[in-house]
Image: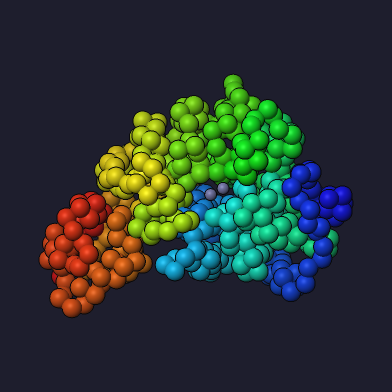
Amino acid sequence: MERTSASIALAVVLCASGSSTPVTAAPNARGDASHAALAKVAAAPASAKAAVDAKMRVHFINVGQGAATLFEFPNGAVLVDTGGEFNGMFDSNAELDAYLSTFFARRQDLGRRLTSLVLTHPHLDHTRGVANVLAHYPPKNVVTNGKTVGDGGALQVLAQNYAADHEGGPDPVGFVAVRVEQIPPTGLTNAVIDPVGGSPVDPKLTVLWGGIATNPGWGDTTFQNPNNHSVVLRVDFDQASVLITGDLEKKAIAAMLAKYAGSNLLDVDVYEPGHHGALNGTTQDLVTAMSPDYAVFEVGPKDRTGGATAFGYGHPRTDVIELLEAGVSKTRSPLTVWAATGTTNFELTPITKAIYATGWDGTVILEAGADGVFQVASPGGPAATLLDLNTATVAQLEALPRIGPTKAQAIVDYRTAHGAFATVDDLDHVPGIGPATVEAVRALVTIGPP
Ligand SMILES: [Zn+2]
Ligand SMILES: [Zn+2]
């Protein structure tokens, strides 16, 4: 471990526990690629940046069951976690790569490089895409909790090794392994955690939680649970604020609340519900402290079944949605979604507040200017929110509640065979779709002009 701390530039602290993997120089194909990309960044004309408006966009990317959230700023892009779900029906790596590729094609000024990659904790549903992200969008900074135990541990090590491999040279990759014991009462920030500058708004990134070195008196199971060591990130864009708590569970949430009691550090506009909406990922006290305007779940759809799916875990829980229905201030067009009462147990649940989910909405994009007023850029405004059943693609249909890939394909096949839908109710002629599904999607779909 000492080699690690000695070899990583700008390391604030390294977690002493968990890692037995030495940080060694890896094959430098990535390094060459990243240095080529660096040259491009240096050569990017200043006018490209000026064309970007002074807004923060938060892309809650649909990586199925898992998490990947991209913060887009006028002067940079920070990716928090890399998803996601992988099975015969969904490959989060392909989805994330396609999304980032399109993103960087639009933001040519960023030279296909992330300003920072933040990994909340080494579970696969957060680290699955690390190798691909490092290879294709090499980050200039890496932030982790320093832990390596967990089913995504090898990929977190890969990110940490990448930072170590690029510690030197004219443009070194910064690295911080966040340890809770080192976080001051005002939260932790520095040039690695907050590498994004800007004018007139300089975004502020602050870490509020991370790996814990010494058990604060919890039971062994709680302390050894990687979720409780999640990096918690607060992002401020002037008056606009977002909180991501990773998979932090109740004991750690309570400890975090105690740490910041009396401050407004947890008071935010947008909350990405912890642990994908699991019962243990959100508490009433946390919701009260945040008083959020919006909540966006990073979660898979109910329709894909199996082990590591939203269906298998029972995410998100109706109890969490109840907390948010009471605690979120903004509203959205009412809709009914599938939420879980237990693992593999779901029931139709009405939503009236501004609660979004990648499992129902697909990728969700919120944007805000310096005034702190958020707008939902995707799914679109009231009119654009509705998906036209006669033009929708399989991918768009798949994101609807209760639909999923098989029924999405069946809808398109039916449309091809029988011509355009005349009414939304005609959906129940599609093989596999019954009245309950028609009701579940009714508020989200439309029949466009012929
Ligand atoms: Zn997770
Ligand atoms: Zn986890």
Q: Which residue lies furthest to the front in this view?
A: 220
Residue 31 seen from this side: yes
Nearest to the observer: residue 143 or residue 410: 410
Task: Using the image as rendered, state which of residue 189 and residue 238 is in the foreground.
Answer: 189
- x and y percentages locating residue 187 in the rendered image: 67, 34
| Quadrant containing the C terminus in the rendered view | bottom left
Where residue 149 appears, as percent x and y from the top left, is 68, 50
Position of 231 relative to 25 (above/below): above
The percent coordinates of residue 387 (x first, y second) are 27, 60
Furthest residue in direction bottom, as rendered: 417
How many marks do you count on the picture? Answer: 0
Above or below, comparing residue 70 to residue 243 in the picture: below
Q: Is residue 102 visible?
A: no
Q: In this view, does 406 lie to the left or right of 210?
A: left
Residue shown at the point (31%, 68%) measured from the top left: 406
Specify the quadrant of the image occupied by residue 169: bottom right
Relative to 59, does residue 410 appear above or below in the rendering?
Answer: below
Residue 449: which quarter of the image? bottom left
Q: In the picture provided, is 181 more to the left or to the right than 350? A: right
Residue for point 55% across, 37% down: 249
Task: Tell me: 378 left or right of 73.
Answer: left
Q: Is residue 395 left or right of residue 283?
A: left
Picture coordinates of residue 362 (x, y %)? Answer: 39, 57
| Colouring convention used in this rendered image of the protein | rainbow
At x 49%, y 60%, the residue is 85
Instruction: Residue at 74% x, 47% y: name it.
Output: 18
